[in-house]
Image (cartoon, helix red, strand yellow):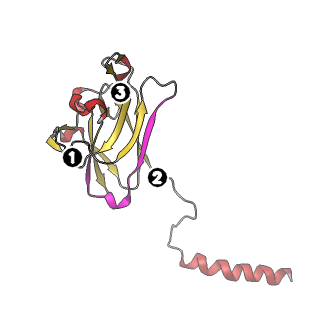
Amino acid sequence: MRVRGMALVLAAVVPLALIAPAGASTRHRRPPVVNLVINSFRFCKAAPCSITDTAYLRSPLGGSLYDNTSAFITIKAGSIVRWTYKDTGTPGCDEFNFGPVNCPGHEVRLENGTPGGGKQIGFAAARSSKPQTISWYIPLNYAGQTIHYFCNINDHWAFGLTGVLKITK
């Protein structure tokens, strides 16, 4: 009885192994992560961010007036982009916390050509005791696209808080 049971298991498993593509893994791979920072009213690869990290000049009506292609970040479709809020230097959002001049934090919002922008990807609070991150999975069907994004909190985009992701296959 035991031999017959093993024979049935082998009969079921062997054909599956034969039709699997060469090199295929049965384990699920985690998507690669691209780490970026939010610092000094900019999005960039590593702090401290500088004025040259402003990826585009945003129109008050929405959309780009000018693209700074040297600040574009290239990322593969199927990856995760993770923005970490690191705004402890001068000038930084953490320093603006008095009266009407208050900076609650930053967001990542997709550009759609309107004054308010499109979908909000996430929000990172200022003056938090824990590291604040915003993560977004780049769908596979975004390959070949260029995604403009910005912070619309208190019009932070006007200070240069804009970014562009160039999505590859």
- Residue at the farthest left position: 65
Q: Residue at x 81, y 84 (%)?
A: 4
To which residue does mark 1 refer?
114
Badge 1 or badge 3: first in the primary sequence: 3
Residue 118 image point, x, y percent: 29, 48
Residue segment shown in magenta: 130-148
| Residue 64, numbered circle | none
Badge 3 or badge 2: first in the primary sequence: 2
Residue type pointed to by label 3 = Ala
| Residue 47, numbered circle | 3
> Is residue 168 shown left or right of residue 58?
right
Residue 164 image point, x, y percent: 26, 43
Secondary structure of residue under mark 2: loop
To which residue does mark 2 refer?
31
Residue 134 is one of the magenta-drawn residues: yes
The image quadrant where one finds the N terminus is bottom right
Badge 1 or badge 2: first in the primary sequence: 2
Looking at the picture, does residue 28 appear above or below residue 40? Answer: below
Looking at the picture, does residue 54 appear above or below residue 9? Answer: above
Distance, label 1 to label 3, CA atoms, is 30 Å
Mark toward the viewer: 1 or 3: 1
